[in-house]
Image: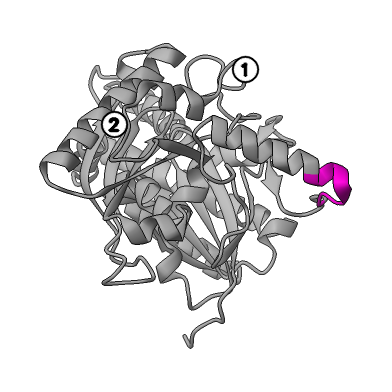
């Protein structure tokens, strides 16, 4: 099962383990990397698990596959074909279902015609599937006692997506599933960047205005400058993306190394922008990507939506980025890697202090997931 959790993780003990820790730390320093990648235990929150994959016996796939953004497009395509067969005319015209933007679908949803009907039925089908995924996940150990599920990704930011999420709430309530359903506080393009302020070393943040962050998805890459506003809000609730670049890499079909090079070029542009605007940028870059993140910065699985082999022993994303980037300020540029759903969920941390256990589902090309336990006492609701 391609998932990572804190259950059953054996701690290192003894002199041999101390020597290994020393070797690991030295290797980290040599690679220009600060701290462990994929850290599961932070000062204010424990990451219980992420990339949880449950087998669907009926489809022989994974439960989460039925509630991804890709799955919604398949549902819409099925309803489109049904409506076309009944009316003799395709209400969507000649454009393929996958090529419609969310804005274009929203315009179709506002009409009272066959296209709007197909969208409504697809949204209902999707809502049933997503509600089922939430219920299945809540039966798993790392999701036990989850009080709130936050939906990330861009799906809910469309009109048809928002309606579907409303139906998910109704279904969970009717089934008496004891969980709240919220949507991400930040824009989907920014949540996966802002979450890095909760992973970056606090001592580093005290000395600088902002950090660089990257969010790699199966369709898009987002790079940005995240200003912490730490001295105005110690809980990072005012952190914001002050400059962002978005690359729909899927349109360009880059190879793996071309994708990494494209990210490096965009980061160089952001470094130049920070210098021009006199933003004190920390020599630290947080990179969020799909998959299981190993402490040494390698990726153990879950990158099937990215081009090329990201799990190769000869590929090390943090090192490859370090080699391509200039120094930032007076320090050596350091890169840290974590799972994209984990990072997007952490952007919500200041706004989840009224619950103890919570989780995130990110609806994108796939369906990402992560669950958390807050360390601090729960505030009065």
Q: Nearer the viewer, residue 51 or 79?
A: 51
The percent coordinates of residue 108 (x first, y second) are 21, 39
The percent coordinates of residue 76 (x first, y second) are 40, 33
Examine the image and state in which quarter residue 351 appears. Answer: bottom left
Question: At 61% across and 22% down in the image, what residue appears?
Answer: 311
Task: Give SS at disc 1.
Answer: loop
Task: Give SS at disc 2.
Answer: helix
For residue 280, above or below residue 73: below
For residue 352, above or below residue 306: below
Q: Main secondary structure of the magenta part?
A: helix
Question: At 39% across and 24% down in the image, what residue appears?
Answer: 81
Magenta highlight on residue 227: no
Which residue in the protein does label 2 denote? 267
Q: Alpha carbon of mark 1 to alpha carbon of mark 2: how far? A: 24 Å
Q: Does residue 65 appear anywhere in the picture? A: yes
Closer to the observer: label 1 or label 2?
Answer: 2
Q: Nearer the viewer, residue 294 or 121?
A: 294
The percent coordinates of residue 226 (x first, y second) are 29, 50
Examine the image and state in which quarter residue 95 appears. Answer: top left
Which residue in the protein does label 1 denote? 312
Please state if 197 lies on the left or on the right of 298 as rendered.
left
**Quarter that holds the N terminus:** top right
Please state if 2 lies on the left or on the right of 374 as rendered.
right
Q: Earlier in the sequence, mark 1 or mark 2?
A: 2
The stretch of residues the image draws in magenta is: 11-18
Q: Dot 1: within a 10 Å radius of its alpha carbon, few (fewer than 14), some, or many (20 or more) residues? A: few
Q: Nearer the viewer, residue 120 or 260?
A: 260
Question: At 42% across and 61% down in the image, what residue appears?
Answer: 348
Question: At 22% across and 35% down in the image, what residue appears?
Answer: 270
The percent coordinates of residue 56 (x first, y second) are 70, 38
């Amino acid at each position: 099962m391609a998932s990572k959790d804190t259950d059953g993780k054996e701690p290192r003990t003894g002199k041999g383990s101390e020597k290994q820790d020393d070797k690991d730390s030295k290797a980290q320093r040599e690679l220009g990397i600060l701290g462990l990648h994929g850290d599961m235990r932070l000062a204010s929150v424990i990451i219980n698990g992420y990339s949880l994959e449950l087998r669907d016996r009926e489809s022989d796939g994974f439960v989460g596959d039925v509630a991804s953004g890709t799955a919604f497009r398949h549902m819409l395509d099925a309803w489109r074909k049904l409506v076309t067969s009944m009316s003799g005319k395709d209400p969507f015209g000649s454009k393929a279902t996958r090529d419609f933007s969310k804005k274009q679908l929203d315009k179709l949803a506002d009409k009272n015609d066959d296209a709007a009907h197909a969208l409504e039925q697809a949204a209902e089908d999707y809502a049933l599937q997503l509600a089922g995924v939430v219920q299945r996940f809540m039966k798993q150990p790392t999701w036990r006692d989850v009080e709130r599920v936050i939906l990330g990704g861009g799906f809910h930011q469309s009109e048809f997506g928002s309606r579907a999420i409303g139906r998910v709430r109704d279904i969970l309530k009717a089934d008496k599933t004891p969980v709240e359903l919220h949507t991400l506080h930040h824009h989907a393009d920014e949540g996966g960047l802002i979450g890095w302020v909760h992973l970056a070393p606090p001592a580093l943040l005290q000395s600088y205005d902002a950090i660089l962050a990257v969010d790699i998805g199966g369709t898009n890459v987002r790079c940005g400058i995240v200003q912490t506003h730490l001295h105005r809000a110690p809980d990072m609730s005012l952190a914001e993306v002050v400059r962002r670049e978005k690359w729909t890499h899927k349109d360009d079909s880059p190879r793996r190394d071309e994708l990494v090079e494209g990210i490096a070029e965009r980061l160089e542009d952001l470094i130049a922008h920070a210098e021009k605007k006199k933003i004190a940028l920390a020599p630290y870059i947080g990179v969020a990507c799909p998959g299981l993140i190993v402490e040494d910065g390698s990726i153990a699985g879950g990158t099937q939506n990215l081009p090329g082999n990201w799990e190769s022993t000869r590929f090390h994303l943090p090192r490859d980025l370090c080699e391509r980037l200039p120094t930032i300020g007076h320090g050596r540029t350091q890169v840290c890697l974590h799972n994209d759903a984990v990072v997007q969920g952490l952007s919500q941390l200041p706004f989840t202090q009224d619950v103890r256990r919570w989780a995130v589902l990110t609806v994108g090309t796939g369906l990402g997931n992560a669950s958390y336990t807050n360390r601090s006492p729960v505030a009065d609701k």
